[in-house]
Amino acid sequence: MNEKVLGVLYGMAVGDAMGMPPELWSRKRVKAHYGEITDFLDGCPENVISYQYKAGQFTDDTGQALAILDSLMETDFVPSAQNIARHILEWAKKENAFENNILGPTSKVALKLFEEGRSAREFSDEAVSNGAAMRIAPVGALFTPDQGEALCRYVAAVSQVTHTSDVTIAGASMIAAAVASAVTYGDRERMIEDALSVEEYALSLGASTVSPSLGARTRLGIRMAQAYADDEETFLEMLYNLVGAGVNTSESVPAALAIAYYSFDVKKCALMCANLGGDTDTIGAMATAVCGGSKGFRAIPKAYVEQIDVANEADLNRYAEAIAAKRGRV
């Protein structure tokens, strides 16, 4: 099981780092500038976010995921909002995240308010961006697919520092459920079924927002994946135009699940997400974590693992061991 969990962590890091250079650029601009991304690249000097990163470095998606795991390991995997907030804030300060425009819109406001000792609920209840979903994948590996409602409650507890709305909790829960399923069954059809199965309950745990249906958009993405199974370029074009690839949870989570379903392989998934356009690093982090959980660590190209290890100061093995030891028992 540790090998599968390690696959989730490295898959997340690979998808995040591969998608980093063109982050938040339109599909048209990505194609015009890069043609096709085929490997890890330094951040682009023209990109207001990625210019500060080197090839193989992961971004705030994986960085915040590890900060959350640090907190959970400190509290014996009982989520503490105060403790999680402190760890994320420490990570943000270490990375100069506020000054370097690394944080997402909701997390930036919420963490500032936390630092000032004020409640962020007014903002977190209205959140629709993907900050909760982008960093949740490793939490999914703590659960088995038959623990759907417990998984959702845990996701809500982990996310409450910055995201307390229905769509953000549901989106994060769907990613976590997809990971739980992939690690357990390694089956793409079952993975989508399990992700969709938690949406309704997870929505009930957050404040109501005006957001499109995550389930409907995910099902649309899967239909496109099936229709264009032999035409990757058309699939990505259709997904970008009809489901979306922006920072809203209602776009990025369905897009990530659809690409994970289409590829179900770490290398292919990471490259597809990087070339999609939009929130490439976040979609890559979510989707490729699912694929890593399905196939396991040994299925990830050795060169990718080496690049991640060299470019980042993180021992992913210790996180995998801690998660595997608690799986199904949190």
Image: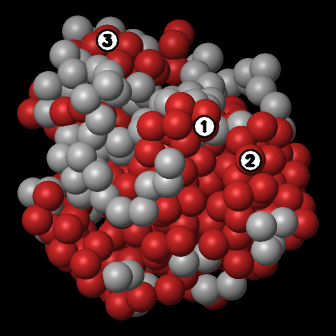
Rate crowding at label 2 as few (under 14), some (14 to 19) or many (20 or more) other CA atoms within 10 Å: some
Q: Position of residue 94 (x, y in %)?
A: 9, 33
Rate crowding at label 3 as few (under 14), some (14 to 19) or many (20 or more) other CA atoms within 10 Å: some
Q: Residue at x 44, y 19 (%)?
A: 105
Q: Which residue matches tag 2?
A: 237
Which dot marks residue 27?
1
Q: In this view, does 56 lie to the left or right of 207?
A: left
For mark 1, give the secondary structure: helix
For mark 3, give the secondary structure: helix
First in sequence: mark 1 vs mark 2 = 1
Q: Nearer the viewer, residue 231 or 112?
A: 231
Q: Which residue is drawn at 32% across and 25% down?
A: 46
First in sequence: mark 2 vs mark 3 = 3
User: Label 1 near label 3: C-beta < 8 Å?
Assistant: no
What is the CA distance from the residue labelled 2 to the residue labelled 3?
A: 39 Å
Q: Quadrant of residue 317?
A: bottom left
Q: In which quarter of the image is residue 299?
A: bottom left
**Residue type at the position of mark 3:** Leu
Q: Where is residue 250 in the image (x, y as percent from the top left)?
A: 71, 36
70, above or below 114, in the image: below
Q: Is residue 107 left or right of residue 181?
A: left
Q: Can residue 255 be seen in this view?
A: yes
What is the CA distance from the residue labelled 1 to the residue labelled 2?
A: 8 Å
